Image (cartoon, rainbow, N blue to C red):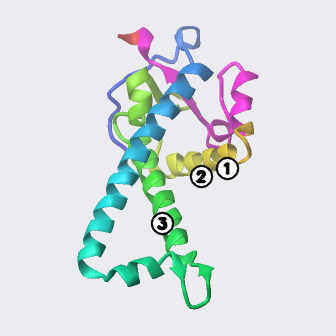
């Protein structure tokens, strides 16, 4: 279900200012800080609840098995999966909402649109997130694409047919 956009971009391509690599990077750092704070708060909350429910020995066994002397990875794998799902939902919901941007992008004045400057769907925002994750995991190489095309589209923008627009000029 797409919502009406807060920002209306005129399709006069001469007036469109695409999001610069610098602004996008700053937005990424802001979002990263927001996500880390969120994860720490969730982890502290879960730990506090588990501490009341589960014994200290059982808590310790989630990470390390004294019997086998091995590191237990199941809990950490579950934690990584949870972080991935929360991150995906955060970016996909925010970028497909009427705000068209994550909190980091909103702070620096960027929005995500399709190539006709309309809101993107949740499906398109999801595709964009997973390709962006891949881009970051390959040492940010997918982001380098944005330095070499006129729309400043990174790999995840090219694959999902989206663009990041600098809305500072519209204020």
Res. 112 in view: no
Is label 1 in contact with label 3 (beta carbons under 8 Å)?
no
* Furthest residue in direction left, as rendered: 52
Left or right, 74 with respect to 43, comes to: right
Secondary structure under tag 2 reads helix
Q: Residue at x 66, y 43 (%)?
A: 136
Mark 3 surroundings within 10 Å by alpha-carbon count, few (fewer than 14), some (14 through 19), many (20 or more): some
Image depth: mark 2 or mark 3 in front: 3
Q: Which mark is residue 168?
A: none
Q: Locate the C terminus by quadrant.
A: top left
Secondary structure under tag 3 reads helix
Residue 54, relative to residue 48: is it above or below?
Answer: below
Is label 2 in contact with label 1 (beta carbons under 8 Å)?
yes
Q: Residue at x 52, y 51 (%)?
A: 126
Q: Which residue is mark 2?
A: 130
Res. 56 in view: yes
Q: Which residue is mark 1?
A: 134
Residue bounds of the magenta highlight: 142-169
Q: Which residue is mark 3?
A: 79
Q: Residue 108, how many percent across, how many down?
A: 43, 21
Find out whether residue 150 is within the magenta segment: yes
Left or right, 161 with respect to 85, comes to: right
Which callout, 1 or 3, points at the residue further toward the start of the chain? Answer: 3
Secondary structure under tag 1 reads helix
């Amino acid at each position: 279900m797409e919502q009406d956009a807060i920002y209306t971009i005129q399709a006069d391509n001469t007036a469109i200012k695409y999001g610069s690599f610098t602004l996008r990077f700053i937005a990424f750092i802001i979002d990263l800080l927001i996500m880390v704070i969120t994860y720490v708060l969730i982890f502290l909350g879960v730990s506090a609840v588990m501490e009341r429910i589960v014994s200290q020995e059982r808590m310790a066994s989630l990470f390390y098995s004294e019997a086998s002397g091995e590191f237990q990875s199941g809990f950490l794998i579950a934690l990584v999966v949870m972080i991935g799902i929360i991150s995906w939902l955060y970016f996909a919901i925010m970028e497909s909402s009427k705000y068209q941007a994550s909190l980091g992008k909103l702070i620096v004045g960027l929005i995500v649109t399709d190539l006709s400057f309309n809101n993107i769907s949740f499906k398109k925002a999801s595709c964009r997130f997973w390709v962006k994750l891949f881009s970051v995991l390959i040492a940010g190489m997918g982001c380098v694409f944005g330095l070499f095309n006129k729309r400043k589209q990174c790999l995840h923008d090219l694959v999902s047919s989206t663009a990041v627009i600098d809305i500072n000029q519209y204020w």
